[in-house]
Image (cartoon, rainbow, N blue to C red):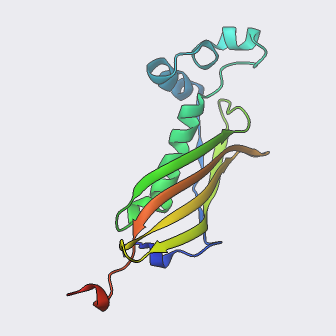
């Protein structure tokens, strides 16, 4: 079943699975996409007071996106992103297990356009606290009605 904007209601929540991130994965991602020393060099990161490497914020956001695709976007009838506001709340360290959720905050139908602006509030959490927050606006189609057919 395809998911349309009409199917979404404020407060509706989509739970994510669980994912444990390894040091090797953190370093591999960072070497390619965000090669700052705190992500690629355990000794230098420890000397900087971090106790070892931490995941790139972009890597953490990519994990969030994968969860969001699995929970929502893989079922969507279509749609495009408009805006994304991201907050990096705490470091993600090797061995951390992440999970989270995305919650529909607002659905603003635009009948003349056949779509709606959907605002989603999402988060990733570890065993202790929120590590990432996301507020995302996307445009999703409304379900066609018999009134839409000429």
In this view, the residue farthest toward the bottom is 146
Percent position of residue 75, x then y: 40, 66
In this view, the residue farthest toward the front is 112
Q: Quadrant of the C terminus?
A: bottom left
On the rendered structure, is 84 left or right of 73?
A: right
On the rendered structure, is 100 left or right of 109?
A: right
Percent position of residue 36, x then y: 57, 15
In this view, the residue farthest toward the left is 150
Q: Above or below — where is 23 with respect to 7?
A: above
Percent position of residue 49, x then y: 79, 15
Q: Quadrant of the N terminus?
A: bottom left
Q: Nearer the viewer, residue 21 or 87?
A: 87
Q: Above or below — where is 110 with respect to 55?
A: below
- The quadrant in which residue 74 appears is bottom left
Report the number of numbered marks. 0
Percent position of residue 42, x then y: 65, 14
Q: Residue at x 67, y 41 (%)?
A: 87
Q: Above or below — where is 73 with respect to 146?
A: above
Q: Above or below — where is 148 with respect to 95?
A: below
Q: Residue at x 60, y 45 (%)?
A: 85
Q: Residue at x 61, y 28 (%)?
A: 55
């Amino acid at each position: 079943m395809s998911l349309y904007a009409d199917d979404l209601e404020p407060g509706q929540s989509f739970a994510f699975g669980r994912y444990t991130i390894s040091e090797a994965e953190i370093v591999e991602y960072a070497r390619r996409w965000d090669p700052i020393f705190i992500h690629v060099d355990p000794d230098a990161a420890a000397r900087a007071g971090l106790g070892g490497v931490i995941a790139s914020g972009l890597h953490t956001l990519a994990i969030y996106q994968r969860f969001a695709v699995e929970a929502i976007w893989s079922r969507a009838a279509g749609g495009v992103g408009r805006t994304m506001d991201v907050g990096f709340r705490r470091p993600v360290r090797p061995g951390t297990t992440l999970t989270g959720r995305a919650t529909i905050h607002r659905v603003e139908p635009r009948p003349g356009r056949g779509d709606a602006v959907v605002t989603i509030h999402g988060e990733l959490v570890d065993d202790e606290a929120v590590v990432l927050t996301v507020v995302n606006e996307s445009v999703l189609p409304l379900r066609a009605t018999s009134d839409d057919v000429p």
